[in-house]
Amino acid sequence: MSKKQPNNFLLQGSILAIAGIIVRIIGLVYRVPMQNILGPSGAGLYNSAFTVYTILLLLSSYSLPLAVSKMVSSHISVGEYKNTHRVLKATIILAVGIGLVMALICFLGAGFFSKVLLKEEDAAIAIRAISPCIFIMALLGVMRGFFQGLGSMVPTAISQIIEQIFNAIFSLVGAYFLAESGMKISEDMRAAYGAAGGTIGTTVGAAMALLFLAFVYMLYRNSLIKKMKRDMHTRAESFETIARTLVSMSLPVILSTTVYNIGDLIDQSIYAYSLEGSYMETWGIYTGIYCLLVNLPIAVSNAMASAAVPTLTKAVTNKNRQKAVKEVSMTIRFTMIIAIPCTVGFMVLAHPIVEMLFKEGTELGGNLLFAGACTVLFFSLSTVTNGILQGINHMTTPVKNACIAMAVHILVLVLCLYPLKMGIYGVLYSHMIFGVLMCYLNWRCIADFLQYDQEIFQTFVLPAAASLVMGIVCFAVYSLIHLITSNIIVSTLLAILVSIIVYGVMLLVLRCVGEEELSHFPMGDRIADLARSFNLL
């Protein structure tokens, strides 16, 4: 039994991780045509609405799956199925209340959020359109937490994929048709209605995921009733106790996640008040092109950070410092092997990538991607060091570091926007400063907690050297093919393909990775066999 439980835990974790990757890919894929449908101004309104929605969602239901799963798991482990059912009923009641209140705040406060915080009245339409989703997500969070507490991640994983598929389809359809309707009124209404249409998919996706989990619960309900009848425990957990437990478990998560996510709202508000007139076009290019692209490789770091947490936690629990240090070193190395070439690639192909994917705002989008390519490096490292600190049981340390970095970030942002008049580039550079400070502060804490000395040459210098060669070849291949074909898509895709091959070869030539490291990569054994056939290993 003891052997099966860890294996089952790893299997369930892997299922959820794979679902998360699929969801991210779908999300990134549909946002490109969404940007093209809405245009820069519409994308700015759409992302503005999501900024407000995200904050209210964090305050209402973001932490519910974790809190509910912990409470359900604790009762299931001792056979208290009646209390498990009480937890489900109580948390549904709480979710209905909290979700309804936050949804009403979002709907009724749309005018305040748009006029006062965002300084853009047209954003109110999209904010109101997305408000029902807050209520649905609260219930969805409870149901996901319930099944996770039962020890099964499959319902959550499937519901996430269902949610994102319906989100992608209905967001694109809603954005297109409402933008066309708004166009009959005016160009401004085209952007506002299109942004509101884009939020419809979010609500539909959440509703379909909730219906799926409700169906799964109905299938499980008879089994739960039978177990409740066999439950001989007499202790009945009260509603007040469940509510207090839910708040005590949720509050730390809410505080930590709010610190990270409120920065977007602060940035937009300060940027809005630094300008005269509408700023939605530049904001839409910044969030809909630049942020969308740089978040792709950063998402890989998120996955790596999540994967590192269980191993690090186990090593710390077993007081195995050597194992923990090795895991930290390996995780940071893998992150840099991915982040450094992505940074170089974005700098070399900034304009071709943007022009290949988007219709409008390509000049500014390409400039932003070139200027902010290093964000990939800093935020990948800060993300993975956040995960490392959580894995070694220092949960509050990243939050403290984020507060310090946020304070400096806001100061730099104000200086960039007001005295220096840097415009949207001021937002970009201050955002980058936040990432740099998070890297430094997290790194210093890891060194103190684990007596960890970071290896530099193989982790940073060799991947940088391989990336430099890759960048030169990438630029040459793109320039040559574009000279011959004058086709940006063909030139860019071939340049990326050649760059991947060159970078992989350079990693082996410079001995940046060996057979042990390759074994951790997908299809690593086959790559190792191929490398040996070319005498690269």
Image (cartoon, helix red, strand yellow):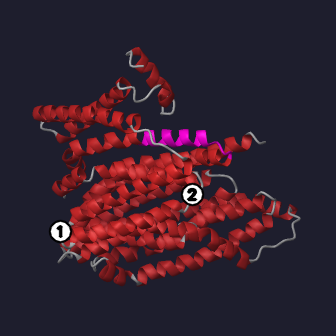
Tell me the tag on residue 431.
Answer: none
| Mark 2 vs 1, N-terminal side | 2
* Image position of 147 (left or right of 165): right
- Where does the image place residue 396, in percent across and percent down from the top left? 54, 63
Image quadrant where one finds the N terminus? top right
Instruction: Report the residue marked by disc 2.
Output: 394
Please say whether residue 18 is visible from this viewpoint.
Answer: yes
Q: Look at the picture and state if 499 lies above or below 120.
A: above
Residue sitting at x 19%, y 48%: 351
Q: Main secondary structure of the magenta part?
A: helix
Whether residue 333 appears in magenta in the rendering, the answer is yes
Q: Nearer the viewer, residue 124 or 412?
A: 412
Q: Which residues are magenta?
A: 318-335
Which quadrant of the structure image shows residue 238? bottom right
Tell me the tag on residue 420.
Answer: 1
Residue sitting at x 32%, y 59%: 433
- Where does the image place residue 280, in percent across and percent down from the top left? 23, 70
